[in-house]
Every structure is written in C-alpha cells, then in structure tokens.
Image (spheres, helix red, strand yellow):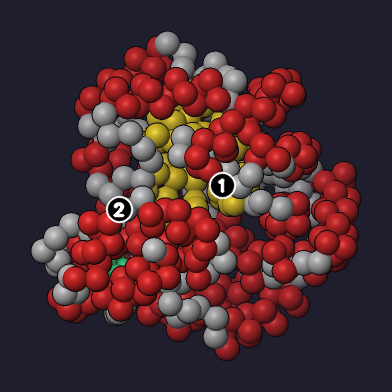
Amino acid sequence: MKPKSTHCNRRSFLKVAGLTGLGSMLSPLAARKSSLAAEKLAADNLPIAKRPFGPTGENVSMLSLGGIFDIPNNQLLLKQAVRWGVTYWDTATSYMGGDSERGIGKYFSRFPEDRKKIFLVTKSGAWTLKGMNRHLQRSLERMQTDTIDLLFVHGINDIGEMSDDIKRWSEKMKSEGKIRFIGFSTHSNMEECLHDAPALGWIDGIMMTYNYRLMHTDKMRAAVDACTEAGIGLTAMKTQGGGQVRTHNETELKLAGRFVKKGFTNEQAKLKAVWENPQIASICSQMPSLSLLSANVAAAANQTRLGVRGHRLLRRYAAETASSYCTGCTRICGSAVQQSVPIGDVMRCLMYSRSYGDPERARSEFQHFGPTVHRRLVQIDFTEAEKRCPQGLPIGKLMRQAVDELS
Ligand code: SF4
C-alpha cells in the first residue's frame, strides 16, 4: 500500500533538509529556522501520511515519536508532534526511570482531548505475569489513560518467550479494556522472531531493528513477508544502522553529495529507504529536539524517491562498513561461549555511545547488567564466537572496550 501523498514539493523540502541535516549539530538559530520551515510544510501538507497497522484497523503515522528523552520538560515538543501528525507515541515502563510515561501523562492531563488522536504504545520488560500486571497498572496510572493501544513484551530474543500464559493474560487484559493489542519488540534474532510469530496466531504487532543494512537479506525479506501475510503490523527501529566500531568513511561523504543533490541528508535517506517498503507501517525514532523532529517530519512528507542509485549507494555503504555493525544474530555468538553474557545488548550500548552520541544512555543500560556480567565480559574467551560471527566483529575486544568505557 502506498502512503497517502502529501505533495511536498522538492524545492521546499530541499530548503528544510538543508536547514535540518543532523539536528544535534544545528545552532539554536538554525534549529529555529528548521522548525519554522517544517512548520510551513506542516501548514501546507500535514498531517504526515498514515499507514494501516496490521489487523488493528488503525492507521498510524508513518513516523513514531520514540520516548527516550526528557518528556516532562519537553511538553511543547509533544504538542508540535501532534500538530505535525506524529501521533504514534512509543514508550516503555523503563524509559527514563519512568519519567517518559509520566511526561506523557502530564501531557494528557493538560491536553486530554489529544488522547484520542494518539496511538499509544508502551512495553513491559517483566518476566512474570504478576510483574506484567504491575507494569501495566503503573503505565496506565502514569500516563493517565484507561487503555494502552498496543503493549509490547520488551526485547525478546526468541519467540518461545511469547508463552501461552502471556496469550491468556493479554486476552484478559483486552477483555477488561486495559490494552487493545499485543505484540513484542526485538533487537536480537529479529528474522527468526518475525518468521515464527505468525504461527502463534495472536500477535498483533512487532517492533524490530530494521534498516538499510538488514532489509535486503533473503531471511529478513521472508520474515517480513510472513508477518505481512499474517496481517501483523510492523514498526521499524534503529533505522540509522549505527555501528559499534566506526561507520563513517569516504562512502558516507559520497552519500552526502548524492543525497544533498536530491534534497535530503544521509539520515533522511536512511529513513526513506525503510519507508519505501510499504510493509513497514511506521518508523520509531528518538527525536529529543524540535530540529530532529522537524527533519524527520520533512523526510516523511517528501515524496522524492531515493531512486535506484540512491539505494545502490546505501547498499554499498552498508557492505563497506559491515565489519563495524552487529546484526543482532546473538544465537550464533551466544552459543559459542560457555557462560551467559548479553553480547548483543552490550553491542547496542556501544552503538548508543559511539554512533548515537548518547554515552549517558549507554552507561545507564550497561550498569543494569551488573558486576557479574561485567566481570565475565573481561574474562571470557570469545575466540570461537569471533570465528562464527558473520560480520567478523572483534567481539572480545569490543566487550573489553565496553567495560572500560561504560563501567
Ligand atoms: S557479535 Fe556477531 S554473531 Fe554476535 S550478534 Fe553481533 S553480528 Fe551476530
């Protein structure tokens, strides 16, 4: 299905893209200009397009507001998101120590009429039904709402984690009106989790790591096809494909030249690569500033396609930097080490620190693994895991660097 046309003309988009670029690098003045330019686009064309989300009967905004930022003190950003049509909001019980959900609740208490405009998603990382009950009740209270539109079991590695008990529990919660839909998010073994989800018969939606690096493999294509055929709604995350070692090289510069000519930045091009697959309902993006929000809204509104050459360039860049990117296939490296260590999760912490420029988040998540895991990361021999790693990553070295940099 094609997204609804918003007819943003290329010239106005070029203006916005040129202003916005990498939002975090903008001066306050440029950021303000960017916001104004996007606002103009909004007045002309918005709300941004919506796409159907699986079997839910819901149309969700193709750009989703990720909730890992200081929402209680950025209420205007939420208001602006609504104005621009970014009405799919994603959070989790754990984000910002609960402040993400509290900030959303603060917003709904000020603007209760906006609640019905929002497709509200949260996640529970509880390991027991008792814990899930507690999380859900807390989420409802924090966000000052009677119902969650979609609840994800947070960060599964294997479809076996979606047990019959969770199925029965979700049916009960649906019947009580506390949730409308159920699904899971996954950063690890995504292809297998997606591929196996339809057989369960009760998964409404999935949020998975998916980007220009991962989307072209036969396995990922088959997995996405299986979910589409089963009517499962899909949301992509980690669409920038940031690496754990280093991803900037000469090809990235060439990319910039190519995409600026077309009117968008590398970051916007990476979003567009994902949106050009109509099987993906929405992209979840962390947008903690108005400049990033406006850059992404501008990308969503723009109808210029990447073109064959644009896709080819991105694929070439992905190939050249493959050895710096962990693809999350933890069943491979995890089975090659004697003791249990969350290799994929540690890799993600390195990505937050090195590619996202967010060492605080990286440290916070790394601390959660605890001292026993930190010790193991230094002591374990990862030689066999490195031999099996399809990306050829120096796993042992990266694990030790993570301990040095994030402890
Ligand atoms: S370290 Fe290698 S084997 Fe392990 S998840 Fe990453 S890419 Fe896969």
Query: Is residue 51 visible from the viewing direction of this image?
Result: no
**Residue at left 38%, top 54%?**
367
Relative horizontal placement of residue 177, taking residue 80 as reference (left or right): left
Amino acid marked by disc 1: Ile
Residue 218 position (above or below residue 175): below
Q: Is mark 1 within 8 Å of ligand 1?
A: no
**Helix, strand or loop status at disc 1:** loop
- Work out which residue is located at the far bottom of the displayed protein and give it: 250
Q: Quadrant of residue 131?
A: top left
**Helix, strand or loop status at disc 2:** helix
**Residue at left 64%, top 71%?**
266
In this rendering, the label closer to the viewer, 1 or 2: 2
The quadrant of the picture occupied by the N terminus is top right
Residue 331: image location, x then y, percent:
21, 59
Amino acid marked by disc 2: Gly
- For label 2, the crowd category at 10 Å Cα-Cα, with few meaning under 14, some 14 to 19 and many 20 or more, is few
Disc 1 to disc 2, C-alpha distance: 22 Å
Mark number displayed over residue 175: none
**Residue at left 38%, top 23%?**
134
| Residue toward you, 237 or 384 | 384
Q: Quadrant of residue 307?
A: bottom right
Read off the residue under disc 2. Answer: 370
Read off the residue under disc 1. Answer: 68
